[in-house]
Amino acid sequence: MGTKKRNAIYSSKHYLSKTRIALQVVKKPRMLAYKTNYFRTKKIMNISKGAKIYIPMDVEDRGVRSPVNITLLQDVHYRLFIDMPKEKYEELKRRLINHETVFPVYLGHANMRAYFNYIGEIEIKENNDNEVELLSLSRAEQIKNLQQGEFTIIMSVPFDYDYIEKNDRIELSQLANVVYHIEPIKVKLAIAPQESYKIVKSPIEEQLNKSLVFI
């Protein structure tokens, strides 16, 4: 599942550009806040308003401690719905079932290891109208109004990148406001009905007749 160039997965030529993902937050995560110290060992340390501090050579080896507030999420539980080219889908399915990965799966930081589990396949069909019970997260512009339920808007989430093949770099090209919710919400969508999908077959019974949108 790897690639010769580190950032080539963002290229429009990569199969992931043809992959669609819908994301459901299954349970409300708990938050744990704590303080720790980071060590800064570089000779020059930037501080506010462009000012800099020079670290003397005699403290360079042990560094300068910087107190930092850190917030961790506990009991995080997401569910992904993935639609991708068939040949890659079969490989992904096999890897998920057998728990085969090239690199460890983690959430944000490499020491926050994540467990994943393959649940099964669902069958979806295009919605006949745009008043739906939405299971998955969406972009704010995809929703016209809320009819029932609760959600939060998370502002300016990085959403898309342009791949610069010449120097194997990526540049942020799109920010989006995300409609975040735990329980399904009843909404009127601002997108065409064929851009949202109703779940008509699923190994999880409570998903039936609920809808999702790919973000």
Image (cartoon, grey):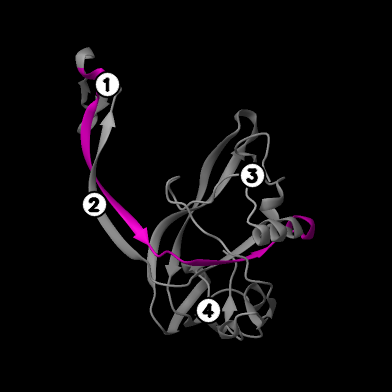
Residue under the point 25% across and 26% down: 45
CB of mark 1 within 8 Å of CB of mark 3? no
How far apart, in angstroms, are the residues tagged by discs 4 and 2? 35 Å
Q: Dot 2, crowdedness within 10 Å: few (<14), some or many (≥20)? A: few
CB of mark 2 within 8 Å of CB of mark 3? no
How far apart, in angstroms, are the residues tagged by discs 3 and 4? 29 Å
How far apart, in angstroms, are the residues tagged by discs 1 and 3? 35 Å
Q: Three-letter amino acid code at disc 3?
A: Ile
Residue under the point 64% across and 44% down: 9
Residue 84 in sight: no
CB of mark 4 within 8 Å of CB of mark 1? no
CB of mark 3 within 8 Å of CB of mark 4? no
Is residue 63 part of the magenta span, yes or no? yes
Of residues 140 and 43, the one nearer the viewer is: 43
Q: Nearer the viewer, mark 4 or mark 2?
A: 2
Identify the residue under disc 3.
9
Question: Does label 4 or label 1 sit earlier along the sequence?
Answer: 1
Residue 189 in sight: yes
